[in-house]
Amino acid sequence: GARPRVLSGIQPTAGSFHLGNYLGAVRQWVALQDTHDAFYMVVDLHAITVPQDPAELRANTRLAAAQLLAAGLDPERCTLFVQSHVPEHAQLAWIMNCLTGFGEASRMTQFKDKSAKQGADRASVGLFTYPILQVADILLYQANEVPVGEDQRQHIELTRDLAERFNGRFGATFTVPAPHILKEVAKIYDLQDPAIKMSKSASTPKGLINLLDEPKATAKKVKSAVTDTDTVIRYDTVHKPGVSNLLTIYATLTGTGIPELEQKYAGKGYGALKTDLAEAMVEFVTPFKERTQAYLDDPETLDSILAKGAEKARAVAAETLAQAYEKVGF
Ligand code: ADP
Ligand code: NA
């Protein structure tokens, strides 16, 4: 039968993707191209829930798309597009806004976290309804599965609730997506402080691996990663978080099992592991950086890929929206 449809998005952020974005998300997207009917988007509508400089937003959106292509997304095997190129996202989001209770939206914990960071008075209403735009993103494509991390579980539950609510009130319209929580997916930690997730906003400068940094600088960061005073290479996230993080990165990047790595490095010191991992990292980031730059140097090709992607996406989105409009009484 038809392959299950999957949808996922990534924000256009300043600078490059970091290693956590790649190993924890983008790498899975690449794999899902061959088993799923995959729709991937750069979510620039979501980006403006916090203030953005227009020129930077435009550049960051293209940079994100270039990196997704460089990472292995193939426009022949997936639909890659920019969210704002498909106006149906905002249109369906309005209907979903009107179907969501204010209290229900208020219970979304990510808004509480994010608005607390900005100060409650400065947070936008867009930030508040962000999960509802996400609901529209998913339902527009009748996605069966949404690959997300644990932190997004609540938003997928909201998606299911709203799909069922709409279907119940107006008649069967939307596929109710399964929460395809990527539990087994690698979670990458800061190289200098393995108690915190590697993240653009929270990481230490030397603990964050940006994929577009100079490969030499990346190798240096790997080699100066925090380990412990012991010398045993063992996966133990409680007692050896630094070493475990390096093992996770190495295993995910090279497709080697962690037990295999533990064996390989038995009796050797951390230096050997770091040297090999640094080398594997350089082998990965060097062509990644080159491919990204090649797309950025050829904006016509990049724009044409994104225009075709938007066209493919719109064909699906417009049909779903037309059904929803009809049902609602428009
Ligand atoms: P950041 O936390 O740096 O702001 P995002 O929240 O924009 O990154 O994450 C984009 C994607 O990358 C999400 O799917 C998220 O789950 C994944 N991701 C981000 N950081 C990590 C990490 N440290 N380990 C694994 N996956 C991550
Ligand atoms: Na984040």
Image (cartoon, helix red, strand yellow):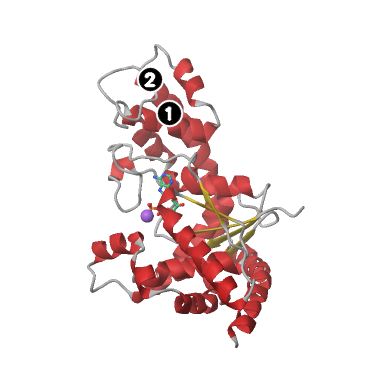
Dot 2 alpha-carbon crowd within 10 angstroms: few under 14, some 14 to 19, many 20 or more: many
Disc 2 target residue: 233
| Quarter holding residue 318 | bottom right
Residue 12's label in the rendered image is: none
**Relative depth, front residue between 145 and 234:** 145
Which of the two discs, 1 and 2, labels the residue nearer the N terminus?
Answer: 2
Disc 1 target residue: 247
Q: At x 44% / y 40%, what residue is drawn?
A: 215
User: Percent from the top left, x then y, of residue 179?
Assistant: 53, 53
* Residue placed furthest toward the front: 168
Residue 208 against residue 172 in the figure, above or below: above
Observer able to see residue 282: yes
| Quarter holding residue 107 | bottom left
**Cβ of disc 1 within 8 Å of ligand 1?**
no
User: Percent from the top left, x then y, of residue 300?
Assistant: 61, 66
User: Percent from the top left, x then y, of residue 111?
Assistant: 33, 64
Quadrant into which the C terminus falls:
bottom right
**Relative depth, front residue between 30 and 300:** 30
Residue 64 against residue 24 in the figure, above or below: below
Q: Is residue 248 left or right of residue 202?
A: right
User: Percent from the top left, x then y, of residue 146?
Assistant: 55, 55
